[in-house]
Amino acid sequence: MRALISVSDKTGIVDFAKELDALGYEIVSTGGTLKVIKEAGVNALDISEVTKFPEMLDGRVKTLNPMVHGGILYRSDLDTHKATVKEHGIERIDLVCVNLYPFKETIAQTDNFDEIIENIDIGGPAMVRSAAKNFADVTIVTDVEDYEEVIARLKNGANDMDFRRSLMIKAYEHTAAYDSMIANYMNGRFNGGFGQKQFIVGEKVQDTRYGENPHQKGALYQFDKHFDQNFTAVKGEASFNNMTDINGALKIAASFGKEPAVCIVKHGNPCGFAIKEDVKASYEEALKCDPVSAFGGVVAVNGVVTGELAQKMNEIFLEVVIAGDFDAEAVEEFEKKKRIKLFKQNAKHLVTAKDPVDFKHIDGGFVFQDSDCICDNEVKNAIQKSTKAADEQEMKDLEIAYKVAGLTKSNCVVYVKNSAMVAVGMGMTSRVDAAQCALKKAREMKLDVEGAAMASEAFFPFRDSIDAAAEAGVKAIIEPGGSIRDDEVIEAANEHGISLYFTTVRHFLH
């Protein structure tokens, strides 16, 4: 039996090679891998002893040889294949262990194109694909995490067709993801990120019980191990809908750095938000905005949930709480609620992945774009358009209102008072309707909007929204500006003594 080992990630490779050696495999290896395993006392042949050719062209060519690929690809059930390899002195390679040049690590460390080009693997993917194609005869190993199981199955005679098939699928996923990464990088470097093909590759984290509805299948996938590193289940299992709601709540709460922000979301839309002196006070204020909608909602806490806060949360039914962390008293308190689900990021504050791109499925394809970002200085650098300037608290309220609006379905209008959201209208076909819907809900909840700040994620096309805001008692407004009637909007703000700021950046979310 013969095993070919050639890996860039050498984690666990010495022990794996030793186990194969002990099982009677003749080890064939290349370059750095050969050096590592031989120094560890493993008997191994240099690949050039098999190919009868030295590595050449600075290592670009070393395994691209019939002695390698013939040994991997020939079918043991075909007499013609057996005759051919016997005629040419080709020996079977029964196991191939390969992972690829560190292209991702290289592009993260350097912009030197020559170095980047040299870290595009050629022989590795070819061997992986050959071994995967012939999985009926060959075991292909591309994942460090599989070493232990592979050895156990070889020892127990359980390296069956089903197991080799699963390794085959993983191998093609490995090479497909690798080539996709290279293509996306090249398009990013030379075509502004928008080439003729766009590849979106995620790694499966877990199945969900179902999708949006029970008749749909669903699963969670991740980029760059984000959920492995930043998402831990404390209690319960996240559903498909939980994950989309968590995403909406977390992005809003996390957009305020280390401030004790709390965001409550229902069906993807915020129904409560506040930043007070601590997360408990923030939650209490956020809940006042719309406690009816908050029932069964998702809460994102930009901090550590304490036992005291957990007691407060347990006063109503919440489906999910996502937080930086939970203290022991909080976990104990939440045990009283069977249905609540708890997830943490193992940190004092929430973090986001800051994905550079965004995409959305449409019938027959998808639309793809750079990710939107409401930068911290966007509100700070907003242009004062009114005669009256906002005071310090009003500027804070404007910042909160604008960030929440930009992360909420358009058309959206948000009202914030004393660092707490008091009204929100979202997903409306008219910006006037959004503003009026928000105020109507505030009146129903007996919330005082007098003195609030108001934000819109896109410009107000007419002064009527400003007039309505003035009637409600709004004292400060922030919007992108850009309407052909901006002058009328500014004039209305001055007439009513409202502070008005333009950011010049629109944040539609559809």
Image (spheres, helix red, strand yellow):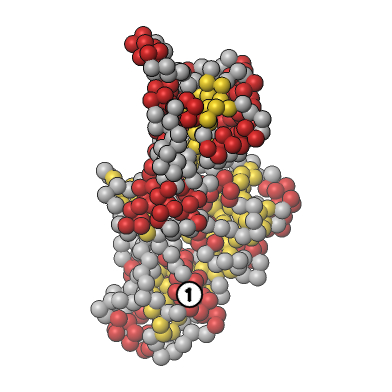
Furthest residue in direction right, as rendered: 329
Residue positioned 40% across, 54% down in the render: 114
Q: Which residue lies furthest to the top in this view?
A: 79
Against 52, residue 474 (above or below) is below
Q: Is residue 52 left or right of residue 152?
A: left
Q: How crowded is mark 1: few (under 14 residues within 10 Å), some or many (20 or more)?
A: few
Residue at position x 64%, y 45% from top? 234
Question: In the shown orientation, is residue 245 left or right of residue 237?
Answer: left
Near-viewer residue (135 or 507)? 135
Residue 144 rendering spot, x and y as whole percentages: 57, 35
Position in image of residue 331 (x %, y %): 70, 48
Identify the residue at image location x=32%, y=82%: 489
| Secondary structure under the numbered disc 1 in the rendered image | helix
Residue 232 can be seen in this image: yes
* Type of amino acid under label 1: Asn
Using the rendered image of the protein, determine whether residue 288 is visible from the camera's viewpoint. Answer: no
Q: Where is residue 132 in the image (x, y as percent from the top left)?
A: 42, 26
Up the image or down, 128 lies above or below 298; here it is above
Q: In this view, does 356 lie above or below 430?
A: above
Depth order, front residue of 355/92? 92
Query: Where's the C terminus, which quadrant?
Result: bottom left
Tell which of 31 and 415 is nearer to you.
31
**Badge 1 is on which residue?**
377
| Residue appearing at x 56%, y 16% in the figure | 158
Left or right: residue 289 versus residue 487 is right
What is the x, y in percent for residue 212?
43, 41
Instruction: Identify the image quadrant of residue 150.
Output: top right
The number of numbered discs placed on residues in the rendered structure image is 1
